[in-house]
Amino acid sequence: MRLSARVDYALRAAVELASLGAGPNRPVTADQLAQAQAIPPKFLESILLQLRRGGIVNAQRGPEGGYWLSRPAEKISLADVIRVIDGPLAHVRGQRPEALGYQGAARALQAVWIALRASEREILELVSVADVASGQLPERVRELTADPTAWV
């Protein structure tokens, strides 16, 4: 699995908003987020705009303005953020795995790509922004990371 810098920064910004308890009465500025997560400020601003358009964050302009999550952090999965930034979770050459047509000996590759997508979904839809912000990851994630071979 390859995640873009854009996705990484979007996830970090969402987690930071959750950890700071940002809300309409307590918005967090893009500069505060950029500084807290060491994200290039101009790059972050375009990511926040994309997250706003995708319904992940709300924004308020002005001197008292900033950003906050559009719904409770427990209701925003990592998959939600990734889909807003990069689109579908798994694709091959820009196509969804079910749309691929392999022939002959390679035919089973389609099933592998679909299984890979299902596996990614299992974890990315299971883990919420709140889970990451609190450091309390679901049991399934803890099980997978307890295996030393997962780290190499």
Image (tube, grey):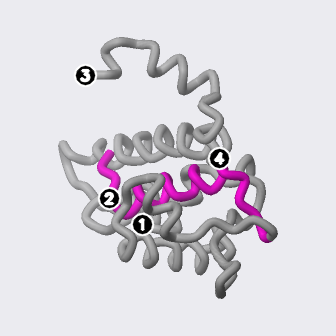
Q: What residue do we see at 68% from left, 66% from top?
A: 68
Query: Sequence-wise, which precedes: disc 1 or disc 2?
Result: 2
Q: Main secondary structure of the magenta part?
A: helix
Which residues lie in the magenta part? Answer: 1-24
Query: Sequence-wise, which precedes: disc 2 or disc 4?
Result: 2
Instruction: Say which residue label 4 marks.
Output: 19
- Work out which residue is located at the far front of the displayed protein and give it: 63
Q: Give the image location of residue 10, x and y in percent.
A: 47, 61
Where is the C terminus found, in terms of image quarters?
Answer: top left
Label 4 and label 3: CA atoms lie apart by 29 Å
**The disc labelled 2 sits on which kind of residue?**
Ser
Q: Nearer the viewer, mark 1 or mark 2?
A: 2
Where is the N terminus found, in terms of image quarters?
Answer: top left
**The disc labelled 4 sits on which kind of residue?**
Ser
Q: Is 39 drawn above or below residue 140 in the view shown?
A: below
Query: Residue 86, labelled with which disc?
Result: 1
Q: Residues within 10 Å of mark 2 (few under 14, many from 20)?
A: few
Query: Sequence-wise, which precedes: disc 4 or disc 1?
Result: 4
Q: Is 144 drawn above or below residue 65 in the view shown?
A: above
- Work out which residue is located at the far bottom of the displayed protein and give it: 62
Query: Residue 152, labelled with which disc?
Result: 3
Quadrant of the image occupied by residue 25: bottom right
Query: Residue 4, labelled with which disc?
Result: 2
Q: What residue do we see at 19% from left, 48% from top?
A: 104
In-front residue for pair 3/40: 40
Label 3 and label 1: CA atoms lie apart by 26 Å
Label 1 and label 2: CA atoms lie apart by 8 Å
